Image (cartoon, rainbow, N blue to C red):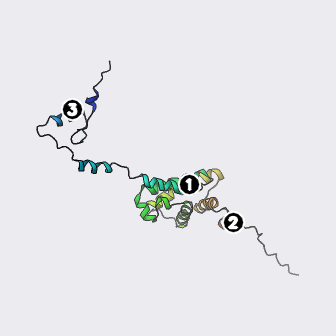
Amino acid sequence: MVRKSRSDKKDTTCKRCDKVYVNPNKLREHLRRKNLCKPLSEITASIQVPIQVPIQAPIQEVIQKSAINDTPFKNPKIEWIYQDIKRKLGIFKNLQQETSCRPENFDRKRFYLEMKKEGNRPYTSMIKSKWSSFLNSAFDYLQRDFDRKRGGYIDKKGVVAKICKEIFPERLSEVTGDTDTPVQTPEPKHSP
């Protein structure tokens, strides 16, 4: 047998002072007190309403506008890492100070430059900043993925080269060292 409660008993908000209580019993105790609560004035009610409006909406609109102008990477793994780092940049405010970049300004070229800068740093066993930690975890993820596809080891510079290949296909020969001109080897001199 299911017991139905009256709808007026479910309300846990005092209509005079707008205070919310945990359960209807606490509300009843509040209403039966000898000294009644003070009713909200019009000024107090108007001040409380804007506080409850979400502040996040304008930031999300800017991110969505910048995402429209940004063409995605062809490689889904690189795209996923890029979106993940951009999301973390929006969540952790200290990263914005560390990189001096806001999420709406963080585009794919900036992603490439940050990865290149981190890839050129010498290896140390200690990671000094949270931003370096995020970038190193991105390198680890991409290295594991590229290693599986190639069947061999790829270093950080190889990962950066793959990202550069996605962003700047016309600069591929500069990054990988491939050239269209054949390398001329000197011919050995024969002594008579």
Which residue is most to the front?
A: 42
Q: Can you give x and y, in whole percent of width and height, for residue 92 in the image?
A: 42, 57
* Numbered-mark total: 3
Image quarter (top left, top right, bottom left or bottom right) of the C terminus: bottom right
Q: Earlier in the sequence, mark 1 or mark 2?
A: 1
Mark before the other along the chain sequence, 3 or 1:
3
Q: Amino acid at mark 3?
A: Asn
Disc 1 to disc 2: CB gap under 8 Å: no
The secondary structure type at the circle numbered 3 is: helix
Side of 175 relative to 116 (left or right): right
Residue under the image location 43 percent in, 52 percent down: 57
Disc 1: which residue: 68
Please indicate, yes or no, whether residue 141 appears anywhere in the rendered image.
Answer: yes
Q: Quick one: label 3, few (<14), some, or many (20+) residues within 10 Å?
A: few
Mark 1 Cα-neighbour bin, 10 Å: few <14, some 14–19, many ≥20 = few
Q: Residue furthest top?
A: 1
Q: Which residue in the structure is indicated by mark 2?
A: 173
Which of the numbered marks, if any, corresponds to residue 49? none
Which disc number belongs to residue 25?
3
Q: Calculate the distance from the C-alpha at mark 1 to the C-alpha at mark 2.
A: 29 Å
Residues at marks 2 and 3, CA–CA distance in whole angstroms? 75 Å
Q: Amino acid at mark 2?
A: Ser
Q: Could you tell whether 150 is left or right of 31 in the image?
A: right
Tell which of 182 and 104 is nearer to you.
104
- Give how far across and how far down residue 89 sits, in percent: 46, 57
Q: Secondary structure at mark 1?
A: helix
Q: Nearer the viewer, mark 1 or mark 2?
A: 1
